[in-house]
Image (cartoon, rainbow, N blue to C red):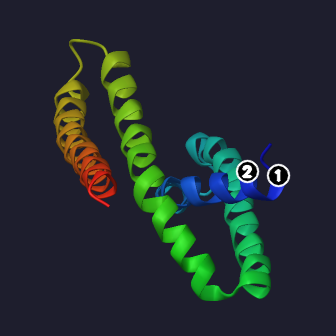
Amino acid sequence: MATLHAIIRWVEGTVFLPGTIWLVSTAKQYFNEEPQSEKRRKLLVPLAALLLLGIFQIVYGILYSVRWGFDVYLTELLLLSLFLGVPLTALTVFLPAVIRYRRCPKDSPERVVYMRKLRTTAVICGILVAVFVVFIVWFMIGIAHM
């Protein structure tokens, strides 16, 4: 049975890339809004949650680096982010674009903008997932020929 430390390590490495992207995106939207606007108030909860996630990752990274060394921490973080974080990032970028497009009224002029964003994210996510699959197949072939 996996220990709690191993589970936290996998989760922390997997959500590092999407969490960082969403933290930067949410903070950018939050600070671009007017100080007393309703949208800025609604962005406060996700921003706080993402900041807590970021603080947890920093503290956990420091503790892990002290115990095992920074090189081990960085290697594991990069490998987990590359192999599990990239597909998760693609999914977390693509799904909100689909939801925004589907919720937009058909006669709204914003629908054209959402369609363009949907196509862009679909192409980027398709490339990311294709590269992920190629890496997995490449490593499977390498393991098969060991």
Residue 73 at x, y = what percent? Answer: 62, 77
Mark 1: few/some/many CA within 10 Å (<14, 14-19, 20+) = few
Mark 2: few/some/many CA within 10 Å (<14, 14-19, 20+) = few
Disc 1 marks a residue whose amino acid type is: Thr
131 relative to 63 in the view: left or right? left
Q: Secondary structure at mark 1?
A: loop
Residue 108 at x, y = what percent? Answer: 24, 19
Instruction: Look at 19% across and 29% down and name the residue there.
Output: 115
Disc 2 marks a residue whose amino acid type is: Ile
Q: Nearer the viewer, residue 79 or 27?
A: 79
Q: Residue 94 occupies which quadrant of the picture?
A: top left
Quadrant (top left/top right/bottom left/bottom right) for the C terminus: bottom left
Give the residue at mark 2: 7
Give the residue at mark 1: 3
Instruction: Look at 61% across and 80% down and name the residue there.
Output: 72
Q: Residue 27 occupies which quadrant of the picture?
A: bottom right
Could one spot residue 30 in this view of the protein? no
Vertical order, 54 against 75 (above or below): above
